[in-house]
Image (cartoon, rainbow, N blue to C red):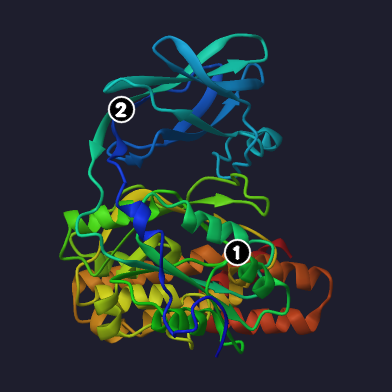
């Protein structure tokens, strides 16, 4: 392990501590209700976010949804407050998840909209969302009822450590660092762990004045674990070098710990961005999860997503252990389950991070991800089988992961067969036979039926 820049001591030092002393109360918006307009003969659409009960930090509200014109194409989507149009955008975001019953797939590919608007000065207010069609007619989509309030900064001023693992992410690492420096909560230390990069990542980090630790390639788990050992915060967040934190990420997670002090870790949701940093598509995580048993809920689905969204207590990681380098791609899910098995955790649903979608992502290897997910779940099988609730959650978890990656693998198998790439087809068939036999059986039956 080599220290590249920053303090030569083997600990990252706090940044911006003095500015923490002048941190003011934060503006918070609570979503009281969302009235969605039923579909009409002219319009199909929905407001997906925000949802009822959501908490939004800062002076900006993000509204996300989709809309398809039936009688005429949709020209713009508008947000109106107190009779005044405050935001207007054309729907341009791909939404292939829109109901397949609509026969016009080309419109579905550009049906999504994303509006950002400043909160007004009123304590309570309504946001009317509607669509303007090409024929100049206006049609409502729904009304968002909101209330503003103020909240004090997190009490006690604990130090938060931000660990940024980085492997060949020169394109994105400055963006990740900038998102940390833009935090409203100012008492943090940050370290970048360069995990054997061959690009200019180290030079870029050095130019930013950020502590950087270099090591031989060990994978994401090894890089995160190294970062943990050279930081000293009471709380720790692991931000991937190609992702970004929202400005209120640390503050919102610390507030969640204040409200739920029994928690071992807390977390929220993420949104997608593309390589350029623009909004890519909607969130894949729920806005709020309040199960009686978070361990059972996590067996069924990893609703915390990437570790960018999560804030851990350092003391808990000292007790439970860190990321397991033998689990490729889902080492975060493995850690969540190990912690939640015996400790309470909390999911608050506030937007915490932005997950970047790009062609060199580790998670694009569907076979690796499916294999890792099933291996992680099987570590909990013996304990789950002795409890009815856990057994059901375990089986739903297997179905979830196989559903998430199985279709893509079957499509790869079909392509290999069509192109007569028999070696690849055989490998894919054998993989499915071991990890998702039901998908292989369905595909063979379908091919036999077509024949």
- State the CA–CA distance, disc 1 to disc 2: 39 Å
Q: Report the residue marked by disc 2.
A: 146
Q: Residues within 10 Å of mark 1 (few under 14, many from 20)?
A: some
Residue 306: name its quadrant. bottom left
Q: Position of residue 380 (x, y in %)?
A: 31, 82
Q: Is residue 132 left or right of residue 340?
A: right
Q: Is residue 303 shown to the viewer in this render?
A: no
Q: Nearer the viewer, mark 1 or mark 2?
A: 1
Nearer-the-camera pick, 37 or 253: 253
Any mark on residue 208, and which? 1
Q: Tell me the quarter of the image containing the C terminus.
A: bottom right
Residue pictured at 58% horizontal, 40% vertical: 100
**Residue 215 percent coordinates (x, y):** 58, 87
Q: Nearer the viewer, residue 73 or 165?
A: 165
User: Is 198 situated left or right of 337 in this image?
Assistant: right
| Residue 17: percent from left, percent from top | 36, 60
Who's the residue at 39% across and 27% down the image? 119
């Amino acid at each position: 392990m080599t220290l590249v820049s920053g303090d030569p001591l083997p600990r990252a030092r706090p940044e911006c501590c003095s500015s923490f002393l002048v941190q003011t109360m934060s503006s918070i918006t609570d979503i009281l209700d969302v009235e969605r307009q039923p579909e009409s003969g002219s319009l199909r659409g929905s407001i997906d976010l925000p949802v009822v009960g959501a908490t939004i930090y800062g002076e900006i509200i993000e509204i996300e949804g989709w809309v398809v014109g039936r009688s005429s194409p949709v020209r713009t989507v508008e947000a109106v407050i107190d009779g005044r149009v405050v935001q207007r955008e054309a729907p341009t975001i791909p939404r292939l998840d829109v109901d397949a019953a609509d026969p016009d797939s080309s419109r579905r590919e550009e049906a999504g909209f994303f509006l950002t608007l400043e909160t007004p000065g009123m304590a309570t207010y309504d946001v009317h969302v509607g669509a303007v069609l090409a024929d100049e007619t206006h049609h409502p989509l729904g009304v968002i009822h909101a209330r503003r309030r103020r909240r004090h900064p997190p009490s006690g001023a604990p130090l938060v450590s931000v660990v940024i693992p980085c492997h060949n992410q020169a394109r994105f690492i400055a963006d990740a660092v900038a998102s940390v420096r833009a935090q409203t909560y100012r008492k943090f230390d940050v370290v970048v762990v360069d995990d054997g990069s061959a690009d200019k990542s180290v030079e870029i980090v050095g130019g930013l004045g950020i502590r950087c630790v270099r090591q031989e390639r060990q994978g994401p788990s090894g890089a995160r674990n190294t970062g943990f050992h050279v930081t000293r915060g009471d709380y720790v967040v692991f931000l991937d070098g190609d992702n970004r934190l929202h400005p209120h990420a640390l503050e919102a997670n610390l507030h969640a710990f204040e409200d739920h002090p029994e928690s071992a870790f807390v977390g929220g949701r993420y949104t997608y961005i593309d390589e350029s940093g623009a909004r890519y598509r909607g969130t894949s995580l729920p806005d709020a999860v309040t199960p009686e048993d978070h361990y059972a809920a996590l067996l069924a689905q990893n609703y915390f997503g990437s570790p960018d969204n999560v804030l851990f207590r350092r003391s808990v990681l000292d007790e439970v252990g860190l990321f397991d380098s033998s689990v490729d791609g889902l080492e975060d899910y493995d850690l969540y389950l190990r912690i939640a098995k015996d400790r309470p955790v909390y999911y608050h649903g506030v937007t915490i991070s932005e997950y970047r979608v790009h062609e060199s992502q580790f998670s694009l290897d569907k076979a690796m991800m499916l294999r890792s997910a099933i291996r992680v779940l099987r570590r909990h099988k013996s304990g789950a089988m002795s409890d009815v609730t856990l057994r059901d959650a375990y089986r739903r978890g297997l179905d979830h992961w196989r559903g998430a990656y199985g279709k893509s693998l079957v499509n790869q198998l079909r392509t290999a067969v069509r192109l007569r790439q028999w070696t690849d087809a055989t490998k894919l068939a054998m993989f499915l036979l071991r990890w998702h036999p039901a998908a292989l059986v369905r595909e063979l039956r379908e091919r036999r039926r077509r024949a």
